[in-house]
Image: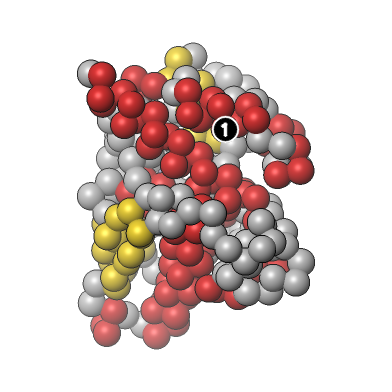
């Protein structure tokens, strides 16, 4: 599946038959992208729990209620448990700090899962590929649990652009200094296909370029939910 909109290196791929909101996988390929070392807020070396944030004042502008539990973690390899826990802690922190979204997530680990799969029911499954156990990938999958790729979805896309007003307002007014440096992060619109959006969709781990990659991801998922709620209220 390509994106006719001319996306430079479409930042995702889809598995066959993934049309319309099933669990998906992610095109992360082990390139680990950013790390806590790339946090935008110098001096906020907050580690996995992240107490700083790009706002710099140490206070969260939002108060989400995203929680997770590891399903049967006593039987997981220890390094998997550690890697996933660290990535989840950081990912959930960003969601709770930069959105008012809530969800109770169940985290599965199964050898047979080739990548990582997030479902709107709140279940995220990881396979044994440690390359997916990074904050950007976990946030991407949380995005699916928050409704990315699920109805109403195509209903809010025209010509591969998200047309819901909350998202349009956010990306149009996003200041240059809060954007990632690559070309497509400068756009004043969000592109979407039947499952994913970009920029800031964190569709590959390498899209984690700065802390703004993570914050904008969460803000856009929150705006998507605003638009979805508004759509549901009138349809
Ligand atoms: Zn995905």
Q: Where is residue 137 in the image (x, y as percent from the top left)?
A: 49, 56
Question: To which quarter of the image does residue 82 belong?
Answer: bottom left
Give coordinates of residue 184: x percent, y percent: 68, 32
Residue depicted at x 63% and y 27%: 172
Q: In this view, does 199 lie above or below 96?
A: above
Counting from the top left corner in percent of width and height, residue 64 is at: 40, 56
Q: Nearer the viewer, residue 78 or 121?
A: 121
Please state which of residues 199 and 92 is positioned toward the viewer in this rendering.
Answer: 92
Q: Quadrant of residue 11?
A: top right
Residue 32 left/right relative to 224: right
Q: Is the C terminus in the top left, top right, bottom left or bottom right quadrant?
A: top left
Q: Is residue 33 left or right of residue 116?
A: right
Q: Position of residue 25 (x, y in %)?
A: 39, 48
The residue lying furthest to the top in this view is 159
Total label count? 1
Q: Residues within 10 Å of mark 1 (few under 14, many from 20)?
A: some
Residue position marked by numbered label 1 in the rendering: 170
Does residue 134 appear in the picture of this structure? yes
Q: Residue drawn at (58%, 63%), measured in percent from left and top?
A: 59
Q: Residue at x 45, y 15 (%)?
A: 158
The residue located at (39%, 79%) in the rendering is 81
Q: Is mark 1 on a helix, strand or loop?
A: helix
Could you tell me if residue 3 is visible in this image?
Answer: no
> In the image, 91: left or right of 151?
right
State whether residue 46 is above or below residue 21. Answer: below
């Amino acid at each position: 599946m390509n994106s006719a909109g001319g996306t430079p290196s479409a930042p995702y791929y889809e598995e066959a038959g993934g049309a319309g909101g099933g669990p998906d996988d992610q095109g992360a390929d082990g390139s680990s992208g950013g790390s806590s070392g790339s946090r935008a807020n110098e001096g906020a070396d907050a580690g996995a729990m992240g107490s700083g944030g790009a706002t710099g004042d140490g206070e969260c502008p939002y108060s989400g209620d995203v929680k997770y539990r590891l399903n049967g973690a006593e039987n997981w390899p220890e390094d998997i448990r550690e890697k996933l826990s660290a990535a989840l802690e950081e990912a959930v922190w960003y969601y709770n700090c930069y959105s008012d979204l809530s969800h109770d997530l169940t985290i599965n680990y199964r050898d047979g899962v080739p990548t990582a799969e997030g479902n709107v029911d709140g279940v995220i499954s990881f396979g044994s590929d440690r390359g997916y156990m990074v904050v950007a990938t976990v946030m991407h999958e949380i995005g699916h649990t928050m409704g990315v790729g699920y109805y109403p979805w195509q209903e809010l896309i025209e010509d591969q652009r998200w047309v819901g007003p909350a998202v349009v307002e956010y990306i149009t007014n996003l200041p240059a200094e809060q954007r990632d440096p690559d070309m497509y992060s400068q756009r004043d619109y969000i592109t979407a296909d039947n499952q994913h959006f970009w920029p800031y969709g964190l569709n590959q781990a390498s899209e984690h370029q700065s802390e703004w990659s993570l914050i904008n991801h969460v803000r856009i998922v929150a705006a998507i939910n605003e638009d979805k709620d508004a759509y549901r209220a009138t349809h």
